[in-house]
Image (tube, helix red, strand yellow):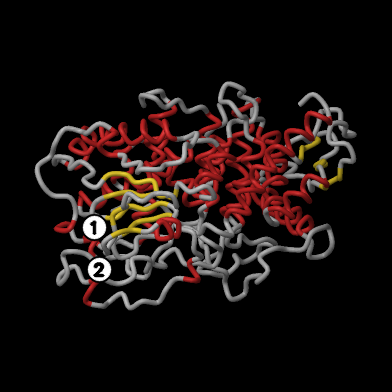
Amino acid sequence: MTGWRTYTFAVRRRAALVTMLSASLAVLAACGASSPVAVERSRELADQPTTDPTSDSTDPTTDPTGPTSDPTDPTDPTGPSTDPTTGPTGPSTEPRPPSDILDVGNAKPGRSYDDLVAATVADLEQLWSTTYPELYGEPYEPLEGGVFPAYPERTDPVPGCGNDESSYPDVRAYVAFYCSVGDFIAYDDGDDSLLLQLSEELGDSVMGVVLAHEWGHAIQQRNGTFAQDPATIYTEQQADCFSGAWTARARNGEVDGVEFSDADVLGGLAALIAVRDPINVSSQNPGAHGSGFDRVGAFQVGYLNGFARCVELIDTPLPLVPNELSPTGNPAGNAEWGDGPRGILTIVVGDLNRYWQLVFADQEGGFPELTIVAADDPTNVDCAEVESVDDGAAFCPSTNQVFYDAEYLRQLYDQFGDFTVGYTLGTAWSEAAQTLLGSPLSDEPRSLLNDCLTGSWVNTILPENGQPPAGTLASIEPGDLDEAIQTVLLIGDEDAEENQNGTAFEKIDSFRDGVLNTLNTCTDRIPD
């Protein structure tokens, strides 16, 4: 950053983007496969219908044609979509052109993402026609029903999912879904669609990410995954992974007609945050997709490791972080702001000092007791080694102080929650740890190691059997790790070529590495 004005502009621009995502969460809650569908929809999981999922109409052994009950019932994760006899049939054929797959209807409004959708559909059909046989050892069955944008003006029918036809309100309720009865994908293309809103705010890449996710459910229908009756969270985890693998393909320039930048990948990450499960929804709840931390993690696994790694996730799922508040947890979910006895600044500073002093207990001199200082001007702090605190906080080696931008941290706290403070200050303590370890790393590698080291601290304050860990001053509660990811979205490099902080994608990956593994996983990055 070159000055206060530039700093303020960047913070406000990125904060506005993530503020929009926080608002979106109120109307888009992630959910899982209902009787015949696997979806992203706009209803809170707590408000799910209570239709009896054991009725004859949803029993795949008695009704091979699909349910006659309400297709919006998300309480049955098995239903006809899990019966491989009700999915696509017939011999494998060559991929069809997008015009044969994408049914835009008779009155479709023009959207900025229309060309991207057509190119994505064509690529997904072509991709899976070759990748599916390689991964599953059997021919790929083309998407039989097609892809249908739904909008109020449309009079051409959208296939029904267990009934004759899907109305626009039906599709709008789900936002986007795959239906095994008819083997088709539908998405809300109306003027006030959440997908349109996300595309306008985050970029058209959101549509590619969504379609790749829904196509992942079509793959699960073909390979018999639904017939295994896994918990919805695991089918959604795999679909997020497939979406990440396809996004890497787009970013690498392998998709005709689609050019993804690092900002487009960031948009995909931000969209996953927007559709995370609400706090206090069990990951084993029928319809659960996972926390933002979990969803972004599955996406990154696919992006970094490819489709073959995603195939493994049904049998060996990725670890999940708790999303339910413990009986002894804070019902409000947030510690109070400030440095009072129970203020978030006091809690975080105390526990960071506790953790790092334990880590360095056997080292001569140990780890110093760091204190925090609010910086009135983030670009001009009273430390010769620190130019600014434009990422929120910075360690001053000569004074063992951490300078922080109080106004910025308070904004993050108000927007997202208390662990924005934990993550931001945590990276400054991690910088102090690197200094003591004699780390020669600089710029991006050093910043990414700080993320990993901060994650290693978080690993020690994760709940144990639903209870806060013993002997700590702080404890991670549901939603805290999502708050950390939202903070990372603000400070990561916008382009991988910058190589200063690391992109948000790289920083999240490093942070997750520390959270899910050991301190040694992080320190092994330091050259000998």
Q: Residue at x 65, y 72 (%)?
A: 331
Q: Is residue 485 above or below residue 383?
A: below
Q: Is residue 359 above or below residue 464?
A: above
The amino acid type of the residue labelled 1 equals Val
Asked whether residue 361 is in view, the answer is: no
Q: Position of residue 183 (x, y in %)?
A: 24, 51
Quarter of the picture holding the C terminus? top right
Label 1 crowd bin: few (<14), some (14–19), many (20+), radius 10 Å: many
Q: Residue at x 21, y 35 (%)?
A: 129
Q: Which residue is mark 1?
A: 181
Residue 117 versus residue 141: which sits nearer the camera? 117
Disc 1 secondary structure class: loop
Tell which circle, 1 or 2, labels the residue nearer the N-terminal end. Answer: 2
What is the distance, in whole Å, between disc 1 and disc 2 at their CAs? 9 Å
Asked whether residue 209 is in view, the answer is: yes
Q: Residue 310's quadrant in the figure?
A: top left
Determine whether, in the image, residue 55 is placed left or right of residue 138.
right
Q: Is residue 87 above or below residue 282?
A: above
Q: Residue at x 41, y 56 (%)?
A: 168
Determine whether, in the image, residue 343 is placed left or right of residue 468.
right
Q: Which residue is mark 2?
A: 67
Q: Residue 212's quadrant in the figure?
A: top left
The amino acid type of the residue labelled 2 equals Pro
Residue 190 versus residue 462: which sits nearer the camera? 190
